[in-house]
Image (cartoon, rainbow, N blue to C red):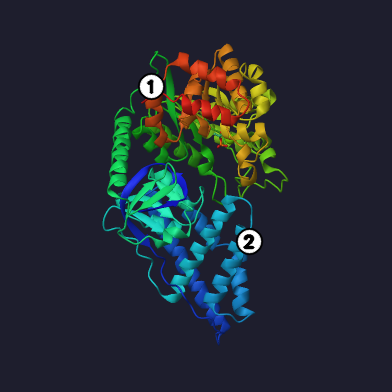
Amino acid sequence: MRTIQGIGASPGLAIGPARVFTPEDLTFSVYAPADREAEWQRMTVALQSARVQLQEIGARAAVQLHPEEAAIFDAHLQMLEDPEWHSAIRQSILEEGKNAESALMESAERYAAQLEALEEEYFRARAADIRDVARRCLRILLGKPQPDVTLNQPSILVARDLTPSDTVLLDKTRLLGFCTAEGGATSHTAILAKALGIPAVVGAGQAVLTIATNERLILNAHRGTVIVEPDAETLQEFERARMAEQNRAEQERAHAAEPAITRDGRQVEVVANVGSLEDAHRAVALGAEGVGLLRTEFLYLDRQTAPDEEEQYHAYKAIFDVMGARPVVIRTLDVGGDKELPYIDLGHEENPFLGWRAIRMCLDNPDFFKTQLRAILRAAFGHDIRIMFPMIATVQEVLQARALLTEARADLERAGIPFAERVQVGIMVEIPSAAVMADALAKVVDFFSIGTNDLTQYTLAVERTNKRVAHLSNALDPAVLRLIARVIEEGHKAGIWVGMCGEMAGDSRAIPLLLGLGLDEFSMAPALIPHAKALIRACDVTTCRTIAETALNLPGYTDVEALLTSSVPAL
Ligand code: PEP
Ligand code: MG
């Protein structure tokens, strides 16, 4: 028995045989081709075939799998079509006289190395994407088939690292978990494992490569450990824990459709964060009472032109129809920061997170913004829809946005097109100025939804994607908690409801605290809903209030974490 330590990237326990995935041998020779033009032609044909393969896998991923996976292949297609990369390869073949294989791999390696040198984990993960795309082209040049990742029995997949294309071809019904030597918490393996709800341990180092196929493994992704060939006693202990975990999850799912009422009778709404039609289906299946955040970016990103009113209308309506009579909070476009649009020049900014993003950009492009508002109002006809503006910093912005909403209504009325007459209008409270001005803002909106991801970033001045300052970024910091407490209190004084759609709302440690602060609505990833509801049912508000009051007066988040860990209610 030996234990390997890694990073738990998707929680859970898995026990089963290892299936070691070794990437195929793609060695190639380096030579100077006699006919450079013909060599470039050979490369162009390979790029073309890679495009066809990616389109096919992308289409398969979009229907059968998860939007997260489909998005990976869109990104691969974009990389494959990158004109700068093409001209680098072309130059090495035509001007430097290299063969296609070496021109391709050298340029890809250069590109990947540049990304790897960057501080942010996100970019380092993109280096893996580039290598994946390049290997696909290389395989085509060498005339080799796509790799075999079949699982003959339920197994834990073990690999140095997994490329997105490997994972998309996997039979997910036999996949018990992932264990990789490389990769971090934001690698594709981690994203995919979370989306599939299966345990994953990543970044466990070279020791992972000593595991052989069919060796028995215990994957404890709660602690980031992998136990290889456990002794009988350890196996028994984990088998019991895994069964208990599975039973608990099954129980929670069986009760997911029931309301979330605390032991002392307070009912709160548990709703979903949704970014696609598939998410909406998943949300309903997992007991969501509505949608607390519909991120509309999915319609705008990864394309060359903006979606028109008709396309938006159909996309929103499809999601509203899935949700039926349940309420849906739809957020207007939130781009900028780290999300760019090719068809709107956001310009170069020194500090994009403090720049021209979300509502700021929309208010400066009223026609563009009104197109989205009209599409939402039309799709909302016959549904309970609430419109939410992101990144509100001032009362003035809300008034401006509301005025454009009135204009959008008037446009539809003039054209005789049916639309929802009554929609609630609310804002995301995710900028400290909005939290401070909550009393004034509560007078001009119907609800607040607290965005703790950005609120934490702006309160503590820690950029969301910067790893070096990540230790300062914690939504449980008392500074953030005090702002949250204020927003809920001022909202309630003004008689409006207050929800939360940042990651914190689905964090089981934070749920009792938020109940104690009086939060009305909790919006989270669909997969978290059954457990969150079970937890709420085990809480009582009086105890939660004491927890909240204590937390607000602690000096730092580590103290808050310690308090919350010691006061988790028994399930
Ligand atoms: C937030 O900031 O908390 C939020 C929910 O919005 P996003 O993560 O989309 O910025
Ligand atoms: Mg935000």
Which quarter shows the C terminus?
Answer: top left
Amino acid at dot 2: Gln
Is residue 490 positioned above or below 272 on the image? above
Q: Where is residue 28 in the image (x, y as percent from the top left)?
A: 48, 77
Q: Which of marks 1 and 2 is in front?
A: 1
Residue ID for mark 2:
114
Residue ID for mark 1:
538
Q: Residue at x 57, y 31 (%)?
A: 558
Is the Cβ of the residue at disc 1 closer than 8 Å to that at disc 2?
no
Q: For marks 1 and 2, give the CA distance.
A: 50 Å
Question: Left or right: where does residue 400 sit relative to residue 561?
Answer: right
Question: Left or right: where does residue 542 sit relative to residue 121?
Answer: left
Is residue 352 positioned above or below 320 on the image? below
Q: Where is residue 444 in the image (x, y as percent from the top left)?
A: 62, 18
Question: Left or right: where does residue 97 sit relative to residue 131?
Answer: right
Point out the quarter of the image occupied by ligand 2.
Answer: top right
Q: Which residue is drawn at 41% across and 45% down?
A: 221
Residue 292 at least partly seen:
no
Q: Where is residue 390 in the image (x, y as percent from the top left)?
A: 59, 32
Is residue 172 positioned above or below 531 on the image? below
Compare residues 121 and 468 and report the one nearer the observer.
468
Which quarter shows the N terminus?
Answer: bottom left
Quadrant in the rendering for residue 394? top right
Q: How crowded is mark 2: few (under 14 residues within 10 Å), some or many (20 or more)?
A: few
Helix, strand or loop for disc 2:
helix
